[in-house]
Structure formats: C-alpha cells, structure tokens
Amino acid sequence: MKKKLLACALAASMVVPFFAGCGDNSGSGSGDTLSIGVLAPLSGEVSDYGNATKNGIQLAIDEINAAGGVNGQQISLNILDEKGDVTEAVTAYQRLMSDGIVALLGDVTTKPCIAVAEVAGSDYEAGNGVPMLTPTGTGADITTYGENVFRTCFIDPFQGRVMATFASEDLGATKVAVLYNTSDDYSNGLAQAFVERAGELGMEVVAQEAYGADDKDFKSQLTKIQAADPDVLFLPDYYGTVSLIIQQAREVGFDKPMLGGDGWDGVIQTLGDRVSDAENCYFACHYSMTDTDEKVSNFVNSYREKYGTDPTSFAGLGYDSAYMMVQAIQEAGSTDATAIVEALKNLDFQGVTGHIQFDEQGDPIKEATIQKIENGQAVVAGKVGDE
C-alpha cells in the first residue's frame, strides 16, 4: 500500500505540568529528589552520539523540573561516561545501581547496550533491578534480555525494510544495489533486511558489494555497481563513511538516488561544499528539524538556545526518552521498579520523534521519517511504517 505523508496533531510543548502532581513516592527516591541514571559515551570515537543524546535528556529533565518535577519530587540525573566501551559500560551501570537510581536512560550504541541490558535484565529478574530505556540502541537483540528493557528508537531490521518499501513504492525502483560494511553489525543488519524486503516486493538485487571497517577507497565496488545499472543504491552505514562513498559514487558516474538509515544523520554537515553530491538521496530518521509540527519546532528552538547547535536525531530520542520515563513514573505513582515497568508496557506517548507505544518485546511501534536531501538540507519526504 502506498504510504502517505502523515500529519500528527501534537501538543504545543513538551513541558507537562501534571508531572508536579501528588503520588506515592515509594522506591529509591530520596526526600524531594529522585535519581535517574544516564549511560552514554561522552568521550571516545562515538562521543558525538553520546553527547547529543545526553544533551537531549538534560534539556527534557530541566523542563520537567521547572514544571514541578514528578510526583512532588525533583529529578537528579546521574550521568556517567562509558567511553563507548562494553566493560566500562557494565562497570558504570553497577556504580549507578549502587548510587540508588530509580531508572536508567541508556546506553547509546548497540554493543554497550547489549552488555548492560544483559546485567540489568538479570538484576530485575532477581528483584533488585530498575527499568532500562535506551534512546538509541538499534541492535535487534537489546530488548530480549529482560522485560524491564525498552527502547525509543526503531531497530536495525525495521530501517532496512522501510527503505526497501520506500524504494519500491515511492521511488518506483525495480532494480537495487547494496554496498555495506561487513565489519559492522549495524550495516550488516540493515543490508540483510533491505535485501529480504526487496525480494518480497519483487525488486531485483543486481549487486551486493562489501567493504571493511578501515576502507577509504570504494571505487572498485562502485564501478561494479554502476555497471549493474540499479535504480537506487542502499548504503547502510554512518555519515562519515557514507559521505566518502557518496562523493566517490558521483565520481564514477553513478547519478541515481542513494538511500540509507539513521546513521546518515550528519552527512550534510560532513559533505560540506560537496553536499550537492547527495542531492535527491534519502535516509530513514527518527524526526526532521523541518517538520512543521509545533512540538518539534519548540524542541529545536529550545535545544539551539541551550546548546548553540542543531539537535540531531540522537538528541531528539534522548529528549523523548526522558519524557517517556518520567511519564511512566508519573503514571505508576511510584518509583517501584515493577510499577514503572508496567507503566512503560502500557505507555501511550506523543513526542518529537512521533507517536510511540511498546510491543510485547519492549520495542516501539512507530513510523520512520524519510528525509530527502534537497538544496543542501534534509526535508521530510514521507513517513513509513513497517508491514
């Protein structure tokens, strides 16, 4: 079925005054303050993602506290840097738990998320855990480690399927090609899902080329793809690598649309004066700054005012995650972990990154915003859900 552009009726502001209401404050909250833990890579190779997510969370909590907090308590964030490292992440989680947090926002990238989720799920099953909500961990397995583990972002396979659907139904593609990173779980996951969905939709996959984590020259693979003459090329990777591939694709003469997932967010800035190479390219993302919805524009303006830069999708997901967790605490009327987990299971949330409810696995039921790069900026091309 052809996907239509969807307009959501969102509230004018993310600030929720009813958070200041009264309720049962049992649990790990201390006095007039309750502590929420945040795990993120604030230094190291993926620190851009971690800091953006942390900034979104901080902005939301500042707004909530200014509106009165939750159940009569102010919220204190306990933020730890796990440096993008699995061992550091688990150690930081254990420190947060010893500090008495009532909920965890994080981790940010997939491998640390999985490591933390495994421990957090075991702790919860043993009766001494907390609800865990990752804003941005897209790896499919993250939420399988416990009923207390949830995520705000869509998962890797979802993005691959959505972009194949978009290629077929909105771009009219009949032949597709894929170029992916064999060393990266994210890239592999999207590529596999895209190819599977393409087959279901009757599209021919005319080329599947691969590269390694340290590769910088992709012209050999791109020349083969160019010879196969696909209608679109799917590039599931992060914006740094994607920007190199886009430039080299144009240099070998490939002039068709290129598609990607949320890892593309930031590619426009990285391309700089070569941004025209990405004209008429598309990627799945969690929200768009050009969305005319008032809730989105309020968030973008507040983020710019506080941090002096534009919010990426990681910031938007962090922002929504903080509001979602606080809404669950409010609806639970308690900081008891079991009560908050049950509230999350039944959550109905409208945020910057869309309307979100959770399925039985703790994954969000939501749509992807498809962004088109046009005249040097990303604009909303449509919103697509899974089938």
Image: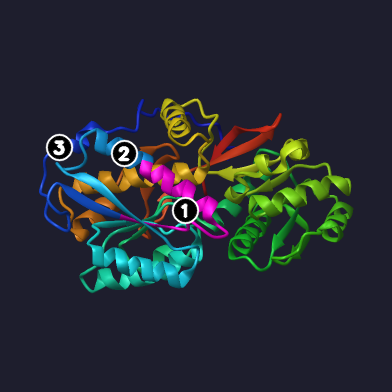
- 3 and 2 marks in contact (CB < 8 Å): no
- 2 and 1 marks in contact (CB < 8 Å): no
Residue 120: percent from left, percent from top: 32, 68
Q: Is residue 194 left or right of residue 347?
A: right
Within 10 Å of disc 3 (Cα), the crowding (few <14, some 14-19, many 20+) is some
Name which residue type carries label 3. Gly
Q: In which quarter of the image is residue 250?
A: top right
Name which residue type carries label 1. Thr
Mark 3 highlights which residue? 21
Q: Give the range drawn in magenta.
A: 37-58
Mark 2 or 1 closer to N-term? 2
Mark 3 or 2 closer to N-term? 3
Query: Residue placed at 26% from the left, 49% from the top?
Result: 76
Q: Nearer the viewer, residue 321 or 371?
A: 321
The quadrant of the image that shows the N terminus is: top right
What coloring was used for the rendering? Answer: rainbow
Within 10 Å of disc 2 (Cα), the crowding (few <14, some 14-19, many 20+) is some
Judged by depth in the image, the label closer to the viewer, 2 or 1, is: 2
Name which residue type carries label 2. Asp
SS class, disc 1 = loop
Judged by depth in the image, the label closer to the viewer, 3 or 2, is: 2
Q: In this view, does 112 lie to the left or right of 267?
A: left
Q: Which of 157 and 181 is in front in this view?
A: 181
**Which numbered dot is residue 62?**
2
